[in-house]
């Protein structure tokens, strides 16, 4: 969307990569028209670390458009955005802990095709209007998560999510499937559905 974000990390093509750290922050957006909580532009090629950040409302929680950024989200909580809670395009993204809930008309977490090698560990993803976690990227890992009460699939793995692993995860009480995969060579183990 073209709405302003509460926090924008833009980056400049060809500029030296930098580090952006956001810790212990609360972002509260009054409505969907308020824009994204944290938005990272496609030209940013540095490191982004969010730790103990809470985003409520707005059009989306955290959106990373750069495939080249190095992203780590630790204990990030997103509540009730109008769109996707965590929308990641960066390869090797690490999402650790935290919670995503109440995303309207969208998935809680989306790992886009460029987010190969990403991990989601120990995150609670619940009560979203579509899937809990959408995986479009290869070699991803979902581990030790609770994915509950979503209005479509708990975890959806698209054809591009080949060689991915879902382990030690609870994916129950979702309207459709706990885990639904189109991906080749998907390993699902030690999960409760």
Image: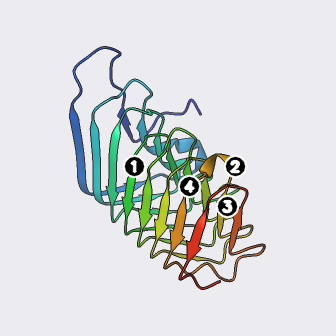
Label 2: element kind: helix
**Left/right of residue 181 with respect to residue 71 in the rendered view:** right
Front in this rendered view, residue 190 or 13? 190
Which residue is located at x 56 percent, y 29 percent? 2
Which residue is tagged 1?
93
Q: CA distance from mark 3 to mark 1?
A: 18 Å
Query: In the image, residue 7 lies at what x, y percent?
Result: 36, 40
Which quadrant would residue 177 be assigned to in this image? Answer: bottom right
- Residue 102 can be seen in this image: no
**Relative to residue 186, is residue 9 depicted above or below?**
above
Crowd rating for badge 2 (residues with CA inside 10 Å; few <14, some 14–19, many 20+): some
Which quadrant would residue 185 be assigned to in this image? Answer: bottom right
The disc, 1 or 4, on the residue closer to the chain's N-terminal end is: 1
Front in this rendered view, residue 137 or 63? 137
Label 4: element kind: loop
Label 3: element kind: strand
The disc, 3 or 1, on the residue closer to the chain's N-terminal end is: 1
Q: CA distance from mark 1 to mark 4?
A: 16 Å
Quarter the C terminus occupies: bottom right
Crowd rating for badge 4 (residues with CA inside 10 Å; few <14, some 14–19, many 20+): some
Tell me the colour scheme of the image: rainbow
Front in this rendered view, residue 19 or 185? 185
Which residue is located at x 44 percent, y 62 percent? 120
Q: CA distance from mark 4 to mark 2?
A: 10 Å
**Relative to residue 133, is residue 139 depicted above or below?**
above
Q: Which mark is residue 156?
A: 3
Which residue is tagged 4?
163
């Amino acid at each position: 969307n073209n709405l302003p974000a509460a926090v924008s990390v833009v980056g400049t093509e060809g500029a030296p990569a930098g580090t952006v750290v956001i810790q212990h922050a609360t972002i509260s957006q009054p409505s969907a028209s308020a824009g994204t909580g944290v938005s990272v532009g496609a030209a940013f090629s540095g490191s982004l670390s969010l730790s103990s950040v809470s985003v409520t409302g707005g059009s989306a929680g955290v959106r990373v458009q750069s495939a080249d950024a190095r992203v780590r989200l630790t204990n990030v909580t997103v509540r009730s955005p109008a769109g996707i809670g965590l929308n990641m395009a960066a390869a090797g993204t690490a999402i650790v802990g935290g919670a995503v809930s109440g995303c309207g008309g969208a998935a809680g977490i989306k790992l886009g095709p460029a987010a190969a090698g990403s991990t989601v560990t120990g995150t609670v993803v619940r009560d979203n209007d579509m899937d809990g976690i959408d995986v479009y990227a290869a070699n991803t890992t979902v581990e030790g998560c609770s994915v509950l009460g979503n209005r479509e699939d708990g975890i959806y793995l698209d054809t591009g999510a080949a060689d991915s692993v879902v382990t030690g995860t609870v994916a129950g009480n979702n309207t459709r499937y706990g885990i639904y995969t189109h991906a080749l060579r998907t390993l699902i183990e030690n999960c409760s559905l």
